[in-house]
Image (tube, rainbow, N blue to C red):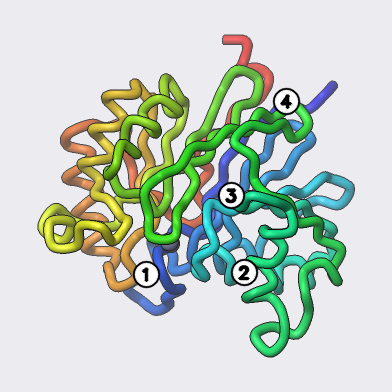
Amino acid sequence: MEDKTFKVTVLGCRGSVPVSGKKSLLYGGETSSYRVDAGEEIIYLDAGSGIYTDRPEEGKRVSILLSHWHIDHLVGLGMFLQKNRIKADIYGPAETDEEAAKLLRTLYSPPFWPVEMEALGAKIHALPYEMKIGEVEVSSAEGSHPNGCRIIKLEYEGMSVVYATDFEALDGAEDRLAELAEGTELLLFDGQLKEDEAEKSRGCGHSTPETGLMIKRRSKAKRLVIVHHAADRSDDELLEMEKELREKDENCRFARKGDELLSLSQECHNR
Ligand SMILES: [Zn+2]
Ligand SMILES: [Zn+2]
């Protein structure tokens, strides 16, 4: 029987820089990367340090979609491709494939990194606003973040996940997100900041869990999962923030490394 599983796994949900130590054991210290299994496809959303330990099954197509080019979303890519010896298709926001390749080469070329991604067999593409990867529909919209960031939606078998990392509700970005996230099963949302921090750092390109909740309500998204936890935020602080959010809406949580956020098989689809 054809595999129709649709699954989202958190490989890393820390913002800005990987952290380690006792204070980050629960939520994890690896930077942004999420694995989406959709039937025969493996699609990674971002390639932060979290991607490195994942091992895609042989014979499956691997696609990596980059929300933007900031280092915390790219830092795991080189070792991941080298270690797994896979030929991935990499998509990032750019006008042309050449521009995308050039942007990636800025970081992944000597002297910053010993090998270029193409030498590992990777194919680099501009991320279009609409495309299909096998049976998965990919759509995206501009968020609001310094140097830009795409909001990415993946749809498969009538279900969807929307990824809004490094996002600030500015310049109409919240309208674009609410539209894209309309009725989605799962909204991954940048809730890096506390309310008082957000007031002080307008324009920094991040949001609060409360803004995520506002967008969840507006878009009627079924579940909200907060991602891109501040690098210096301890497990205790994150637990406290998560508790406050869940008191307002229990269909919310803060991402933890290893979480399976959406795991639906063929049986569930038929319900
Ligand atoms: Zn980031
Ligand atoms: Zn960023």
Q: Secondary structure at mark 1?
A: helix
Q: CA distance from mark 3 to mark 2?
A: 12 Å
Q: Secondary structure at mark 2?
A: loop
Name the amino acid type tagged 3: Leu
Name the amino acid type tagged 1: Ser
Instruction: Name the residue located 18 percent from the left edge and 56 percent from the top edge.
Output: 198
Q: CA distance from mark 2 to mark 4?
A: 28 Å
Tell me where residue 71 appears, x and y as whole percent: 52, 70
Q: Mark 4 highlights which residue? A: 4
Q: CA distance from mark 3 to mark 4?
A: 19 Å
Q: Secondary structure at mark 3?
A: strand
Q: CA distance from mark 1 to mark 3?
A: 22 Å
Which of the two labelled residues, at mark 1 and mark 3, occupies the earlier sequence position?
A: 1
Which of the two labelled residues, at mark 3 and mark 2, occupies the earlier sequence position?
A: 3
Would you place residue 26 above or below residue 35 in this image? below
Q: Are marks 1 and 4 in contact (CB under 8 Å)?
A: no
> Pointer 2: residues within 10 angstroms few (<14), some, or many (20+)?
many
Q: Are marks 2 and 1 in contact (CB under 8 Å)?
A: no
Name the amino acid type tagged 2: Gly
Which of the labelled discs sits on residue 3, or is there none? none
Which of the labelled discs sits on residue 45, or is there none? 3
> Pointer 3: residues within 10 angstroms few (<14), some, or many (20+)?
many
Quarter of the image with the C terminus is top right
Tell me where residue 56 appears, x and y as whole percent: 76, 53
Question: Image quadrant of ligand 2?
Answer: bottom left
Which of the labelled discs sits on residue 76, or is there none? 2
Instruction: Name the residue located 63 percent from the left edge and 32 percent from the top edge.
Output: 130
Left/right placement of residue 242 relative to residue 157 reads left
Instruction: Name the residue located 63 percent from the left edge and 76 percent from the top edge.
Output: 107
Tell me where residue 156 appears, x and y as whole percent: 64, 25
Q: In this orientation, which residue lies closer to the viewer: 248 or 133? A: 133
